[in-house]
Amino acid sequence: MTEKAVFIYSDDYLKYKFGEKHPLNPIRLEITYDLLTEMGVLDEKDIMCPRMAKEEELALVHSPEYINAVVDAGRNPNGGDFTNFELGTEDNPIFEGMHEASSLIAGGTLTAVEAVMEGKARHAVNIAGGLHHAQRDRASGFCIYNDAAVAIAYLRKKYDIRVMYIDTDAHHGDGVQDIFYDDPDVLVVSLHESGHYLFPGTGDIYEQGTGLGFGSTINIPFEPFTEDESWISAFERVVIPNARAFAPHIIISQHGCDGHHLDPLTHLSLTMKSYEEIPRLVHMLAEQLCEGRLVALGGGGYNIWQVVPRAWALLWCQIAQRDPQEKLPESWIKKWESISGEKLPQTMSDPPDLVPPIPRREEIIEKNNITMNRVLRQSVMFF
Amino acid sequence: MPVLVEDIMTRKVITATPEHSVMDTLKIARQNRIRHVPIVEGNVLKGVVSDRDLRDVSPSVLASMDLELLEKTKVKDIMVTNVITVHPLDTVEDAARLLYENKIGCLPVVVGGNRLVGIVTDGDILFCFVEMMGVLERGSVIRLNIPDKPGSLMKVLELIAKHKISIISIFMLPAGEKGKGKREVTLRLQTIDPSDIVDDIKKLGYEIIWPEFWGEKR
Ligand SMILES: [Zn+2]
């Protein structure tokens, strides 16, 4: 089998754009791509072009009515009321060519899955993917088509294999959870900020799946202001033993980086340390359990200058086993500082004093430990 | 949203009669996994026994190894007869207050003074509040203090409507001791990004409690 990792990318990814003032700005993909190129860790032969997802592939998880609504709305953005599908809201504005742009992202994740399953690559990374909120019959939280769910459903149908989905976005991976809630062969694990305040509000530890799928959903909700230590230890204490017990054939991971302290949408206090460590652990699991079969996706991430490019550069470096330099390239900093008017980071890691001392820190750690113990106690019965 | 006792009460009530033995009543409670058994004659409420009343009989019996006592003692000898009850048209808030103030776990629902038509437990009330909080729908939460005067909530609602965002649930607490002149409001909004609304609320001069409390972030 090949040792290669592939990076799925196309300039057409930038067409998934809700508008100038919308928090999900696709330029974050371009800045990341540019950083990797300037660092010299990504070149032509690593890149694979995404294909479009076919409508019947989208229909593996989405209702025909919803797909039709996306097609219609995208053809005529001012043409009607699609709010039943949560399209045309402040979160999910309608834009021209919405169906095509969303299908390309879902197709990119399918390209990644095919590359890995057909032995063309050992691992594949699609940073445009990870749109984990989209539901069967409606859009949600900036997500039109649920590329991760489409890819998992494709794997289930074509190969009938066991799939583990690991979601470390700051938001609960509710769309993927709901779609496979009763499937015992898809283990859905989500680490996230608790839904007490944060969107979508789901992801409590008691959501464990239903019917035959009971036990194949694992949620680890964290307190606001949670730091690296809790986040990484949850992976080691809960995710790894559950992965071993489940023995997946392939891992699909979602790497939203909106849990970073500098992200404007959430209230976690993670640093680049988590975004280095999580991909390393995911990669290790894939090597140990799945002969390397791993598809890593992007996700949320709304500090597009200081956080996203570094987090996803680290993701690629960890998975493709490239060496990330601590000092970021001068040329990259200059170029994007002049475009953004923002101060860009000089180094890959964060300064040690990035997160100010957090009041109630000990209580937060204690509560997180209690949560992890509860989740572990619940999940060991399925080993 | 359920507001009346009849909206949330259990109508098929598991009961026993005053002539049942304590042992039989214990069995009824265990088999049906209930903690309170209304005691009726026909459909007339005569009393209630709780798991605690039943347990209180058991230890002395176990001590003397005389299980016969459980068989011989009749429920009518241990049941509580001055039962606090509610009417189907009482509000859920009434029922919650009665449970809380009297430190009890259930309220038989009666009409005509003593005819049993249902039962409400502390669990039913909790479930009702969970539903009312709307946690089953997707959204983000913000908490704020608004001035305790007419029209101030309206300003917040108008501003949210301007952003075309739906409200999943809204809670307003009565003005508390420490917050004289203001009221705390908790809103669950159907959006992943409430930050524009938070900014607009601040422009009104209202105080945001979450996402600002616990300090300094942004
Ligand atoms: Zn997110």
Image (spheres, rainbow, N blue to C red):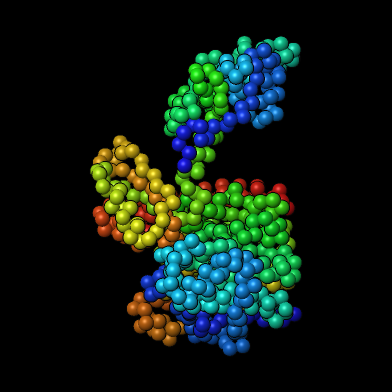
* Residue B188 screen position, x and y as percent: 42, 52
Tally the marks: 0
For the point 46% across and 83% down, the residue is A329
Left or right side of A17 for A7 = right
Q: Is residue A286 visible?
A: no
For the point 66% across and 26% down, the residue is B29
The quarter in which the C terminus of chain B is drawn is bottom left
Position of residue A222 relative to residue A114, above or below, is: above
Residue at the extreme front of the image, as rendered: A80
* Residue A114 screen position, x and y as percent: 68, 77
For the point 51% across and 22% down, the residue is B111
For the point 48% across and 77% down, the residue is A75
Q: Decide which of A45, B46 is in the foreground and name it.
A: B46
User: Residue A166 falls in which quadrant of the image?
Assistant: bottom right
Q: Decide which of A334, B186 is in the foreground and name it.
A: B186
* Residue A292 screen position, x and y as percent: 70, 72
Position of residue A264 relative to residue B73, above or below, is: below
Position of residue B7 relative to residue A332, above or below, is: above
Residue at the extreme bottom of the image, as rendered: A44
Q: Is residue B67 visible?
A: yes
* Residue A174 screen position, x and y as percent: 56, 59
Position of residue A215 relative to residue B12, above or below, is: below
